[in-house]
Amino acid sequence: MKSFKTLIASLLTLACFTAAGQSIPVTTKLGKISMEEMKLDSFQADTSAIALVLWKSEDTKIDYNIATRSVLKSTEDIMRVKVLKDEGKDYADGTLILDRTLDRLMKISVTTYNLEGGKIVSTKLAKSEIMRSTYEGDYVKVSFAARNVKVGSVVEVMTYIESDRYFDIPDFYFQNDVPVNLCQYRIAIPNWLGARKTPRGHHYVDCVSDTEAGVDLSPTIANSLNVDTYRAVNVPAMRPEKSVYNVRQYRSAVAYDITQISLPGNYQNLSKTWGDIAKAVEDSDIIRNLNASYKFKDEISPIMKEDIGDKEKLAKIAESIRAKVQWNDMVNLIPDKASEILKAKSGGSADINALFGSACKAAGYEVAPVLVRMRSSGYILDFRPYLSVFDTFIVRVKNAAGEEFFVDASDPCAYPNNINDDYLVEKGFMVTGDTGEFEWKDLTHLCRNISSYVVAASMDNGTMQGNMSSTASGGPAYDLKQSYRNAANEEKFIEAMEKSMSIEIASFQMSKNGSGAAMRIDFEKECEITGDMILVNPFLITFNSDAAVREEKRELPMDFEYAETINYSFRLQIPDGYVVEQLPNSIVYKSELPASVLIRCAATDSMITVMYKFDRNSMMVLPSQYDEFRQFWTDAAGVNKQMIILKKAK
């Protein structure tokens, strides 16, 4: 979308203006906590804040290490947090993911400060309370939780890490989900390392550039460090909002990418292109496992002989693999060896999708991996090509007729061309198999997303009773299957339905047929009786809640799971002795999004019919579109609140 790209371009502008002083004066020295910080009980600029980051500092330095004759990156992180509410007591707790061979945690301190008897008392976390565990093979997870934390505490965490991964500089965020009083970031990079910086966000940040001497390499090599020092104060919180998959991508931040090494006798261009990433995928276990010989051809052969379409065949192949390897609900990018996965009988998304791709190739299909950065991880920046930006991959399967099917074989709720909405991205990275060749695939409209409901009801002494049949395809079918799968049992699933619709369910049936799902319930619902009138809401389900657009203004876009169509039909037999006093208004509302909602109502002497249709062909509402869309959505929500009024006949 052109307008979305314009929004992102504006977010990538970080101005350098002189910032005013922070709201809470702090001493930027480890362990120096003032009485003013301790006595602070609220933050006037944001009274809803559960915590306040009093001081956040990071100092990253890259230089040559004479002792090891290698490049070394050292990073000191300090965060001082004031706990303002119960919900903020674990805000300073953290987790570090370290490469066991390239990263070294040199120092860590976690200290809680409390005011007791008018004095500041400190509680340090013991080394034995800092937990270490293996994390995905070559990585170690270090977890810590501060001790003796209560409302009013100040918690200070310091870590110092040395790393040989000098080329990997994490993005630094000035903005958090709680307000930040003072934020400082200093980064020093040698002049013989090329670096590209990418600032983004709207909050103004001071930036001062300077140089300092690096280690003495030799009389003929000048080694100086280019230093950028950032300072931001009074940074407002940017909290997760409704209908936003990833709020982090919009926060003020700066990123540094190492692009080259330029030393006598050692010149390396480290900048990457997406073609380089495609080559890396071709040389990885992703392609190797997809090309591996599938060991269960005898099981594929009967499926391929069935008189069904390719989509159904692919679904059966995926099901046969999940019968051998259960998905462990983990999302990963690089698959393990097939023999290890089959032995373990369990694996992540990449493991199962690699087995599936291998099976499809053995069945005669053309296959290719489509790497996905999930919507909850944020957008892909075209000018930052890294393999690490992707979370996992799905499989593109192509038949002899040239039809394409996109499959996540690991997910039991998915179906060819019907996948989890977190994967519905505009830019899936498909590696074709030719050297360095790739193609961007739009996964946002793989299928039609339609849900239909038919309600037939009658009335007896203010109790509406009847049945509702519903069918779903695409995203709504996936959601229904996933909700049913995630429920503890069918009874809990029915209880959740009863609560959401304010009904009692007498009987329940559900069927899952390929890409679709269907459900039928028999229900009873108590209606409001006022004097000689009965008030009936024809909508058992609220399709448009005005809670979704409660904010008058939005700074961030609204994300929807998918484009969708909803059809709803309601028939009510008019009880004996009653006449129709009022029907919902027949209305059509339209949005420029585009989206529309329609309701048509009619009545005879014995029957009331209500027909409702909702269409939304967009997955995003930009802030510039929000005012118009909010009015449309509010009007649509009003449609769901309209009542049928039955009155006793005179």
Image (cartoon, grey):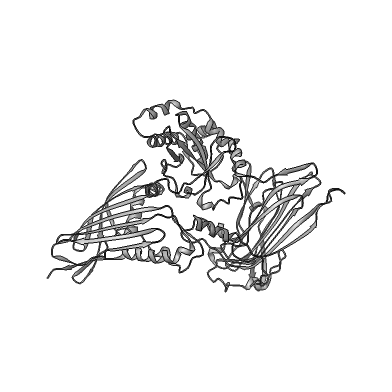
- The quarter holding residue 281 reads top right
Residue 50 against residue 437 in the figure, above or below: below
Residue 373 against residue 209 in the figure, above or below: above
Q: Is 596 situated left or right of 123 in this image?
A: left
Query: Which of these two is toward me, 472 or 33?
Result: 472
Note whether residue 336 is visible: no
Q: How many dots with numbers?
A: 0
Residue 157 placement (x, y as % from top left): 66, 59
Q: Which residue is drawn at 35% across and 33% down?
A: 308
Note whether residue 76 is visible: yes
Q: Which residue is drawn at 45% across and 39% down?
A: 409
Residue found at the very far right of the displayed protein: 219
Residue found at the very far front of the displayed protein: 2
- The quarter holding residue 588 reads bottom left
Query: Which of these two is toward me, 149 or 242?
Result: 242
Residue 587 against residue 35 in the figure, above or below: above
Residue 410 placement (x, y as % from top left): 46, 40
Query: Which of these two is toward me, 270 or 592?
Result: 592
Q: Is 164 situated left or right of 565 in this image?
A: right
Residue 547 placement (x, y as % from top left): 41, 64
Residue 650 placement (x, y as % from top left): 12, 71
Residue found at the very far top of the displayed protein: 298
- The quarter holding residue 643 reads bottom left
